Image: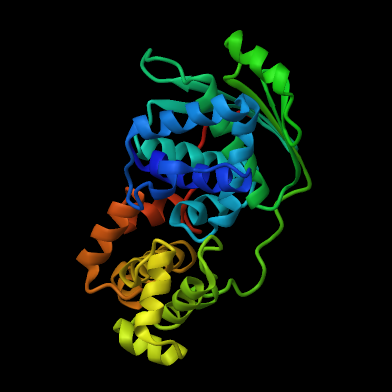
Amino acid sequence: MSDFASAAMMRVLAQGLREQGLDPGAAATASTGARVELDLKRALLQRVVAQRGLHVLPLLGRGLHRLTHEPTHQALAAARSPRDLFERWLRLERYIHSRHRCVVEACREHEAHVRHVSLRGGAPPSAAEDLVVAGVLAALLEAIGLQRVRLHVGGVPALPEPDAAGLAQAARRGRTAGWQLAWDGSVPPPAPGTPPPRELGADLAWPEPARATYRHLVRDLTRPLPLRELAAEVGTPWRTLQRRLGEAGLSYSRLLAEARCRSGAWRLLHTVDPIAEVGFLSGFADQAHFTRELQRRVGLPPAAYRAAFGATSGAASGAGG
């Protein structure tokens, strides 16, 4: 799965590892683009299982709660119901031509039954892949506002309190592909006046100098500032700011690219502004620049991203009743 989902998944897993007190290693520097090597993901999962066991894998999905401003997260967390969420996930799998797919066998008011399968008779997902994807779906149900989300894998509790011995046994018996997800409540209606991009916070994993720089950038992306000028506006010597960003493994150009891409993704999802205007307001040099950068980052050009995940996109069919 050397594709969009893998790159997004690696960023989720890296954050999930940090929250479990584990070193994400190479996952922490996974590409910010749309692709990542499959071997890197497999090596990461093997290391986690060797250190802590299979039962930790579903917990890693919760790392996405600190990545709320990524375009991938925005697209999925904009779902208005569990059924809508599953349909968005299925559309995502189709767009990236994933070899593994989730089949929603039933989606009812407070539960869903999902099976993780391989297409075209290929090798089935591994137990580790089953558990990771199931955990991400559970975390996405939390992200859209559902309460007390529970996950059973092969009939064994996996979230919120995983049964380590039971999950290990399910893996040995090849029973990790079938999941039951349950939740309380319903998706709350969107708050009036969805916050504009300038109010969207920076990545919580960044240190404060990076977050402050990002917040200043997104106030007006039509006014690109050189680092020296921005540093003067925030009251920090530019060399000091450059050094602090470097110590965090970041750069000014990386923050500017993040601000542009996240702002553009937000506008595509929440407005009906023409794509050329979205690109301009998000600070891109022209529409072609916007298209190239979003395609590189999320694997979809702006029109396809909006059509698949925007507020006016049609819900696909296929989730059983």
Task: Write the residue at 39% across / 20% down.
Answer: 119
Which one is in front, 233 or 130? 233
Q: Quadrant of residue 288?
A: bottom left
Which one is in front, 280 or 225? 225
Task: State the colouring used for the structure image.
Answer: rainbow
Query: Eyeballing the image, is 200 above or below 77?
Result: below
> Relative to 280, is 199 on the left or the right?
right
Residue most extreme to the top: 173
Locate the C terminus by quadrant.
top right
Q: Quadrant of residue 175?
A: top right
Task: Write the residue at 57% across / 73% down.
Answer: 195
Which one is in front, 176 or 267? 176
> Relative to 36, is 78 on the left or the right?
right
Which one is in front, 269 or 230? 230
Instruction: Say how many tags the image has.
Output: 0
> Relative to 278, is 176 on the left or the right?
right
Can residue 316 be seen here? The reply is: no
- Across and down, in percent, residue 203 comes to 51, 63
Query: Eyeballing the image, is 165 above or below 3?
Result: above
Q: Quadrant of residue 60?
A: top right
Task: Write the residue at 42% across / 36% down.
Answer: 93
Query: Eyeballing the image, is 19 above or below 132?
Result: below
Locate the N terminus by quadrant.
top left
Task: Write the residue at 52% across / 40% down.
Answer: 87
Query: Eyeballing the image, is 35 above or below 44?
Result: below
- Across and down, in percent, residue 261 comes to 37, 64
Can residue 249 be seen here? The reply is: yes
- Across and down, in percent, residue 209 comes to 49, 75
